[in-house]
């Protein structure tokens, strides 16, 4: 059976950049591919979580709030979201809505356990890629906090 994924294209994504071809293939055997139309809510803030999404095509927005929505990020092909659910299984911390028609690879929490038995190095590589992205998001969030809340420049000087 042929994979529903373009293995060469997947290998170029940052989540799988360090995978060898066999590891990419093993992962795709365990994952689903889904598509959503534009302006479709993928999940809501507070919803249960046990899987992440890798964007294969399209754009999504990450948002919080009901009455006063705040857009936290726009993510594009190659980005991923919902990754915290692989670590903690806590409810979703934000909602995600497609802005354009989107194509996704879905990686479930249980997929990591199965992959760990067949391609353990792939799991490590994926977790490192997720960790790097989480660190980058945390650094960006810290900078926004300092800029907006504390009114400081990066060197700690007051802007007033």
Image: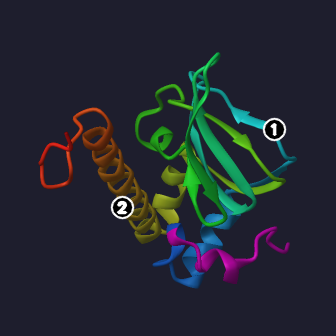
Q: Residue at x 35, y 57 (%)?
A: 136
**Residue 87 at what x, y percent from top left?**
41, 41
Left or right of 31 in this view: 148: left
Q: CA distance from mark 2 to mark 1?
A: 28 Å
Left or right of 72 in this view: 3: right
Q: The N terminus appears in which quarter of the rendering?
A: bottom right
| Label ID, residue 40 | 1
Please report contact status of discs 2 and 1: CB closer than 8 Å, yes or no. no
Q: Residue at x 81, y 38 (%)?
A: 40
**Quadrant assignment, res 21:** bottom right
Dot 1 lies on which element?
loop
| Label ID, residue 159 | none
Left or right of 73 in this view: 66: right
Mark with earlier residue (2, 1):
1
Left or right of 51 in this view: 135: left
Location of mark 2 (residue) = 132
Q: Nearer the viewer, residue 15 or 21?
A: 15
Magenta-span inclusion, residue 6: yes
Give, as a single range, the part of the protein colored magenta: 1-14
Dot 2 lies on which element?
helix
Magenta-span inclusion, residue 85: no
């Amino acid at each position: 059976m042929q994979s529903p994924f373009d293995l060469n294209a997947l290998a170029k994504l940052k989540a799988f950049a360090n995978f060898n071809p066999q590891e990419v293939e093993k992962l795709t055997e365990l994952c689903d591919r889904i598509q959503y139309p534009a302006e479709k809510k993928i999940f809501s803030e507070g919803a249960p979580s046990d899987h992440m999404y890798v964007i294969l095509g399209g754009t999504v927005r990450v948002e919080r709030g009901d009455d006063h929505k705040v857009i936290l990020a726009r993510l594009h092909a190659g980005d991923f979201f919902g990754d915290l659910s692989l670590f903690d299984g806590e409810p979703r911390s934000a909602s995600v809505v497609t802005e354009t028609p989107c194509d996704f690879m879905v990686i479930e929490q249980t997929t990591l356990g199965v992959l760990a038995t067949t391609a353990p190095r792939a799991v490590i590589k994926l977790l490192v890629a997720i960790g790097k992205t989480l660190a980058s998001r945390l650094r960006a969030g810290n900078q926004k906090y300092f800029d907006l809340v504390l009114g400081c420049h990066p060197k700690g000087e007051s802007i007033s």
